Amino acid sequence: MQDSLRERWDGVRERISAACAKAGRAESEVLLLAVTKVFPATVIEEAYALGMREFGENYVQEFESKRPLLSELPGARFHLIGHLQSNKAKKAGELFDVVQTVDGPKLARRLDELGKPMDVMVEVKLADEEAKHGCDPAELSAVVEAIRRSANLRLTGLMTIPPWDEDAEKSRPYFARLRELAAAQGLQGLSMGMSNDLEVAIQEGSTIVRVGTALFGRRQKA
Ligand SMILES: *Cc1c(COP(=O)(O)O)cnc(C)c1O
């Protein structure tokens, strides 16, 4: 029989707890972001009913269609963790509380112009894979400055997605690099680590782990 969402949630929280203990960190320093992309709105409601409050979605359009199906979920916060094109900034601003994937000054300006106070993170591209988005580390200072100059955006930290590898240790150098880049900018927040490598991420200082598969099971290919 399949584990229930409650059991999988407990399992993920135990992993976070063990990783924090091993790293000598307080559990309260690490936020569990439940990544619900591809899953229906009912799954978000089920997770909310259990007590989850922070949700990650990848696609503006997908969440736009799910949002009206959700009842009022007081205290829930929705993070955009997928690439955001500037021309969708307005829609994203309406739908999301946090945009973790700001990757350039232009997108920062677009979000700022919406006039809505919003938490943002800068996505940094640390591997040169064609498919990955994010700002080049060399351009990070410019993006950080643009956000800091903005009236409505609050910069909370950096986010990255290492190349997928079954071996979680392969992610470590990317996580360590993100931590160094954040420290150099005086930033605390580090969104890094997913189902497969959250322990390594927590050892390297993660403050937000983004977990999909370990909570909701494997996603069907869209
Ligand atoms: C899908 C996704 C996740 C969750 O990945 P899992 O391996 O299913 O935990 C985390 N972050 C981003 C940016 C994603 O796109």
Image (tube, helix red, strand yellow):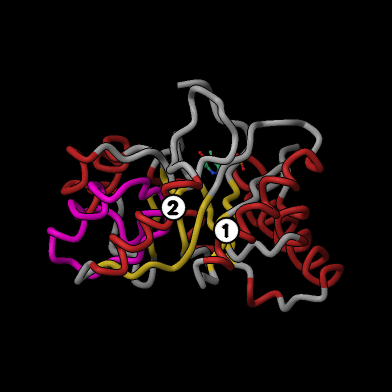
Q: Residue tagged by mark 1?
A: 181
Q: Is residue 183 left or right of residue 205?
A: left
Look at 57% across and 51% down and name the residue there.
210
Q: Which badge, 1 or 2, is on the more N-terminal residue?
A: 2
Name the quarter where the C terminus is drawn: top left
The extreme right residue here reads 22
Look at 71% across and 52% down and name the residue there.
198
Classify mark 1: helix, strand or loop. helix
Residues under labels 1 and 2: Cα distance?
8 Å
Q: Is residue 177 left or right of residue 153?
A: right
Q: Which residues are magenta?
A: 94-122
Closest to the observer: 215 or 94? 94
Residue 142 image position (x, y, % from top left): 35, 55
Instruction: Specify the amino acid type for callout 1.
Output: Leu
Q: Residue tagged by mark 2?
A: 140
198 is higher (above) or lower (below) than 117: above
Name the quarter where the N terminus is drawn: top right
Q: Is residue 82 left or right of residue 28?
A: left
Verify whether residue 110 appears in magenta.
yes
The extreme front residue here reads 138
Q: Which mark is residue 108?
A: none
Residue 9 image position (x, y, % from top left): 66, 56
Q: Are marks 1 and 2 in contact (CB under 8 Å)?
A: yes
**Few, some or many residues within 10 Å of mark 2 (<14, 14–19, 20+):** many
Q: Quadrant of ligand 1?
A: top right
